[in-house]
Amino acid sequence: MQYLMPHSASRPNKHADKQVCHRGGSKNSVFRTTLKVRIISPYYQKSASLHSTNSMRRTILAILIVLGVIVIDQLIKFDIKTTFMLHEDYVVARDWFHILFTENRGMAFGMQFVGTMFLALFRVVAIGLFCVLLSRLIQRKAPYGLIVCVAMIIAGAAGNIIDNMFYGLIFTESTPYLPAQLVPFGQGYGSFLSGKVVDMFYFPLFTWPDWVPLFGGNTFFGAIFNFADASISCGAVALVLFYHKYISHMGLLKK
């Protein structure tokens, strides 16, 4: 018995091999694309994770420096304020290192150009600008040394503004006869933002001879400063010496 197959079924499909090859090629192409994505995706995920880790490390470093400088500065000031009488001088190392308790309403190293209120507001604005700069540096994975410099400047400015903001509210007036005392909040010698900055470090290294023009008879180094001032100065000097090109070329205050 002979079975007759339909004409369409018995005729070979001329395009079958081409279709299979085409489909096979498409599958291979999809496979290669998928494999490529699977290979590349972990790389980008790892890169993003590494970037996040580096940013976190820089953020933690900056926070630790700011908090560390502020805590050390305030501990020193609190001790001097409550144990030393105003202008009391304690010689630490012969004649070149003294602890000399003074107070001022002005800028770093006892300079006085403007009022306390204006200076406090200026410090707040400056801290805000440097915080923006620090944020840009962290985002751009700046060198750790640069992060340290900016954090030291922020911490020093914050340490002095704490004096302006709160010392008039929590301390009695320092006099040449009695140290200041800690009092309940609001019962101090002044109001908010009227506090005096506490200075204590004095390094009279030598006295200029009288015949030296302009400086004759004056002491070098005659400024009296605190730990916050030292933090600002060290951070600013290192910033200018080692990282000024980095900041100027990167335009870090721009988005």
Image (cartoon, rainbow, N blue to C red):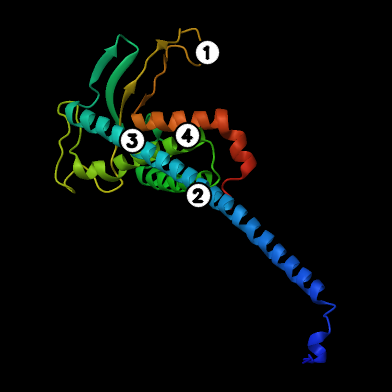
- Residue at image position (24%, 17%) is 90
Query: Which sits earlier in the primary sequence, circle 3 or circle 1?
Result: 3
Say whether marks 3 and 1 touch (CB < 8 Å). Answer: no
Residue 191 visible here: yes
Compute the Cα span from label 3 to label 2. Answer: 28 Å
Tell me the amino acid under the disc marked 3.
Answer: Gly
Residue bearing mark 3:
68
- Mark number displayed over residue 179: none
Can you give x and y, in whole percent of width and height, for residue 36 in the image? 65, 56
Horizontal relation, residue 147 to residue 89: left or right: right
Residue marked by disc 1: 213
Task: Quote the CA–CA distance across marks 4 and 1.
Answer: 35 Å
Disc 1 from disc 2: Cα separation: 61 Å
Residue pictured at 82% horizontal, 80% vertical: 13
The three-letter amino acid code for the residue at tag 1 is Pro
Taking depth in this image into account, of 145 and 214 the one nearest to the observer is 145
Which label is found at residue 149?
4
| Closer to viewer: mark 3 or mark 2 | 2
Judge from the rendering whether residue 46 lies leftward or rightward of residue 196; answer left or right. Answer: right
Q: Residue at x 26, y 30 (%)?
A: 76
- Contact between marks 3 and 2 (CB within 8 A): the answer is no
- Vertical arrangement, residue 177 with respect to residue 51, above or below: above
Could you say where residue 154 lies in the image, as x and y percent from the top left?
A: 42, 40
Label 2, on which residue? 49
Upstream in sequence: badge 4 or badge 1: 4
Which of discs 3 and 1 lies nearer the camera? The answer is 3
